[in-house]
């Protein structure tokens, strides 16, 4: 009998039909990582008929066994639901994954608090979780933390955070750096530097930057 790690290697090599029986057997035995892997197959119809309900069921079963990736996945999927009950359930799963130490889940939990998804809006808790995710290298959370500081009028702190994420290559943060230079947020106004950062953001794939480049500077990229 193959190990879970060997089955994962087969799956990554495109040999889904060889990996699936191993995932199934180990999942039947209650292995949380196998439950997570098998859920993925069913949810996306890889090697088995697509069955999103079964995929969710298996992910929830894995999450009940403290499998953090499964909890994060369910939380993320439910974050798009318009059903308030599912949004709240999604928040709880996301919180479970964040408290287990997953940086992406920490950022997602911060989003829940910031936007009021599945819970009340709480900017203090949003800042706390964005900071935790940022400390673990999540550039999206670093930028979002900058957005909050900008909203609070602390543009010196906001600019430093935008610049940190931008220098790591995050295109949306590059756009914020450009906006800071263009408007004098936390840094002296400098349209030339703003233009340079906006071009970098657009070249890195930011649609907002491409639009701003067109509107503000009359350029297309």
Image: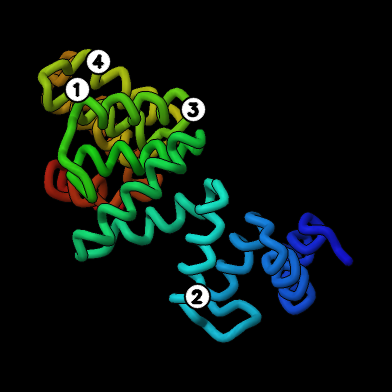
Label 1, residues with CA under 10 Å away: few <14, some 14-19, many ≥20: some
Q: CA distance from mark 2 to mark 3?
A: 33 Å
Q: Position of residue 135 (x, y in %)?
A: 45, 23
For mark 3, what is the residue? 136
The dot on residue 149 is 1
Q: Is 69 left, or right, of 172 in this rendering?
A: right
Q: Residue at x 24, y 21 (%)?
A: 158
Q: Earlier in the sequence, mark 2 or mark 4?
A: 2
Pair 4/3: label in front:
3
Q: Position of residue 106 (x, y in %)?
A: 40, 36
Q: Earlier in the sequence, mark 1 or mark 4?
A: 1
Which is nearer the eye, 73 or 58? 58
Label 3, residues with CA under 10 Å away: few <14, some 14-19, many ≥20: some
Q: Earlier in the sequence, mark 3 or mark 1?
A: 3
Q: Position of residue 156 (x, y in %)?
A: 21, 13
Q: Quadrant of the N terminus?
A: bottom right
Q: Is 47 left, or right, of 165 in this rendering?
A: right
Numbered disc 3: secondary structure: loop
Label 2, residues with CA under 10 Å away: few <14, some 14-19, many ≥20: some
Numbered disc 2: secondary structure: helix
For mark 2, what is the residue? 54
For mark 4, what is the residue? 157
Q: CA distance from mark 1 to mark 4?
A: 7 Å
Quadrant hosting residue 204? top left
């Amino acid at each position: 009998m193959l190990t879970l790690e060997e089955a994962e290697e087969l799956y990554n090599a495109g040999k889904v039909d060889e990996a699936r029986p191993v995932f199934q057997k180990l999942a039947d035995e209650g292995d949380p990582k196998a439950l997570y892997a098998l859920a993925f197959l069913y949810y996306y119809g890889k090697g088995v008929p697509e069955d999103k309900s079964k995929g969710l069921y298996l992910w929830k079963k894995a999450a009940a066994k403290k499998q953090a990736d499964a909890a994060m996945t369910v939380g993320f999927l439910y974050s798009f639901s318009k059903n308030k009950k599912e949004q709240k359930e999604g928040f709880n799963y996301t919180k479970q994954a964040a408290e287990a130490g997953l940086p992406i889940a920490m950022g997602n939990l911060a989003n829940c608090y910031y936007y009021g998804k599945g819970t009340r809006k709480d900017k203090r808790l949003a800042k706390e979780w964005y900071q935790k995710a940022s400390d673990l290298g999540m550039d999206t959370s670093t930028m979002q933390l900058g957005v909050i500081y900008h909203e609070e009028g602390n543009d010196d702190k906001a600019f430093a955070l935008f610049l940190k994420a931008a220098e790591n290559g995050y295109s949306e943060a590059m756009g914020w750096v450009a906006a800071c230079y263009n408007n004098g947020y936390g840094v002296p106004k400098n349209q030339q530097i703003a233009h340079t950062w906006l071009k970098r953001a657009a070249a890195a794939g930011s649609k907002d930057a491409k639009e701003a480049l067109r509107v503000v500077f009359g350029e297309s990229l």
